[in-house]
Each structure stands twice: as structure tokens, then as C-alpha cells.
Amino acid sequence: MKKIAVLTSGGDAPGMNAAIRAVVRIADYHGMEVYGVSRGYNGLINGQIEKMTPRSVADIIQRGGTILKTARCEEFKTEEGRAKAVEQIQKYGIEGVIVCGGDGSFRGAQLLSRLGIPTVGLPGTIDNDLAYTEYTLGFDTAVNTAVSAINNIRDTMTSHERVSVVEVMGRRCGDIALYAGIAGGAEVIMVPEIPVSIDYICQRLLAGKERGKLSSIIVLAEGAGHGEEISELVEKGTGLETRPVVLGHVQRGGTPTCRDRILASRMSAHAVKLLSKGVGNRLVGVKGEKIFDMDIDEALAQKRTFSKELYDLAIELAN
Ligand code: ATP
């Protein structure tokens, strides 16, 4: 394969630019041409496709977001939409596509592969909600952003002897809350995978106060409740002054961590190699620090598991 395209789709994630850069440079190094598609599947349908060179991806490895822009595209979910995309792909002589995105984007990649366009997926989403891979691009950066916010919040909470509820992203997956909670020394971590009662939380906070804790932080995944509401209930149940902080979109942006940049570079190199051999319908992932690829159908059929081991560790650490 000599001509490939790359696009970013779904929610943006830090590390997407590092992935685009690596795809372009590694493909060029191996004598392949790369076309950048703007605005996810919209760009494929509308022909927003431009040739990229190693120089057009200079100075982006350290930037959050995605220079190719990202979008949701309802039209790609229809047969007609996908047919238009295939027409554009053929018009440009593109032989394979690399899609960086989340679960939804991979369903699109699966359908594109079925239409005879070899497509390879790179996991780009801050949520870490893809079952087949241990880590997704952007997750490490999002966790680090949340931890640095928790550090700041802790300083002021300790001075005032308050409780803080820090709401982080994660509708169905509590990994950001779990990792940021452990690294930020949270007293309580609330995730959608393990529902807990307000009574239980209040008991733990009061027991911590008995043991001499000066402040307490609850890290709450958005899928486990709303910051304001949980904060009110905790204040009522404990009598401790409690404040909510919703981190919101600050977690999506920012300069990617070294880990995300290196992971993006390694995964992208793997994706380019697959396409260079004409292999499509694969997702690239990482397990035990090893980069691997897996059939899309098989990868998407996997069920996510939540690390109960880490969750239990967090409880012991909050002692
Ligand atoms: P994130 O995890 O950040 O939300 P995502 O890739 O899961 O990322 P979605 O909005 O679910 O984000 O999907 C992105 C795009 O992928 C959609 O706008 C659509 O263009 C395409 N897509 C999603 N699901 C399908 C599907 N079943 N068939 C075809 N295309 C799809």
C-alpha cells in the first residue's frame, strides 16, 4: 500500500496530534503518501482531504486537540453517507485509512473495512473506556490534569478543614476518577462501576476526621453522580463544610504527557506497518507495555473490566 489517509473522530484527546505526526512521518519514511482528512468522517464524505508531509506536522507533538479537527457525523451512519466516503477515497486513490477515536469511531472503521477499504483504528479518547486495550491516548494526560487540580484543591481544603467533591469526566467508565483519586490521595472515589450509598461515604469521612484528617477529597466520576448534588448530601450527612468542583473540559485539553506522546508514536507506527502490508479491519492497542493489533469485530465484542484491585487499594490508602 502506498497511499493512506488519517482522520480523528469523536471527542478530541491529547495525543491525537502526536499520532497524526507519527503516521505522516513513519509512512513518509517508508515511502508512503499520507492524506489528512478534516473533521472526522464528515471530511471523508465531503472530500476535505489534503496531502500531508513531514513538514506539515512540525511543532504539533506537544499540542493538545487535533490539527485535523474532529466531529461527530450522523451521515456516516447511513449507507448513502458511507458510499459517498468510499467514492472520495477512490477519487484520491487512497488505499487504506487510519482512524483515531473511540468506540463509535471504530464502529465506523469496521463498516468502512467491510466496504473494502482496509481501515486501522488507534484508540484516542481520554475516558480509557475501550475494553480491548489497557490504555487509550489522552487518558494519562487527563489523569495528570485532574491530579494537578486535586493538588491545588487539597491546599485550600486543608487550610479551611473542608471536604471537596471533585467531579471528573467518565460517564460509563470510572478510570479517570480511579487513577486521579489514587494519585491525588483521595479519601473516597465514586465510580459508575461500583455504586455506593451516601451513608457509607459520610461514615468514611467522619471516621477519617476522627483519625485526625484535616481535609477530605471525594473524586467523583460524572457517571456516578453530580458534584453539586453529592456535595449537598455529604454536607447534610456529615455536618462538614463541603464544596463541589467540576473540572469539565480542562481535562480534555492541554499538552500531552510524555507517556501519551510515546504511546501515540508507537501505536501509529504499528498502524502504518499494518496498512503497508495491506492489513485492515484491525485496532491497535497496548497490553503490558506491548503494542498489539486485534480484529475490530473481536475487539469491539469485548466487555470492559474495572480494576477492583486498584479500587480496593484506594480504600486502604485512604486510611
Ligand atoms: P468518544 O469516546 O470520545 O466519545 P467516539 O468515537 O466513541 O469518541 P462517537 O460520537 O460515538 O465518538 O462516534 C464518532 C463518530 O463515529 C460518529 O459521529 C459517527 O460519524 C461515527 N460512528 C459512530 N457510531 C457509528 C456506527 N454505528 N456506524 C457508523 N459510524 C458510526
Image (cartoon, rainbow, N blue to C red):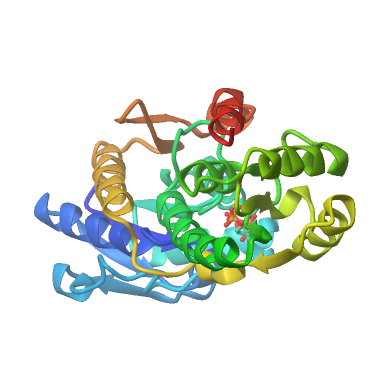
In the image, what residue occupies the spot 37% across and 74% down? 67
Q: Position of residue 153 (x, y in %)?
A: 54, 65
**Residue 4 shown left or right of residue 153 in the figure:** left
Of residues 177 and 81, the one nearer the viewer is 177
Of residues 70 and 35, the one nearer the viewer is 70
Q: Is residue 260 visible?
A: yes
Q: Position of residue 140 (x, y in %)?
A: 41, 50
Q: Position of residue 191 (x, y in %)?
A: 69, 42
In the image, what residue occupies the spot 39% across and 53% down? 97
Is 170 situated above or below 251? above
Of residues 157 and 94, the one nearer the viewer is 157
Of residues 138 and 267, the one nearer the viewer is 138
In the image, what residue occupies the spot 84% across and 56% down? 239
Q: Quadrant of ligand 1?
A: bottom right
**Residue 94 shown left or right of residue 188 in the figure:** left
Which quadrant holds residue 72?
bottom right
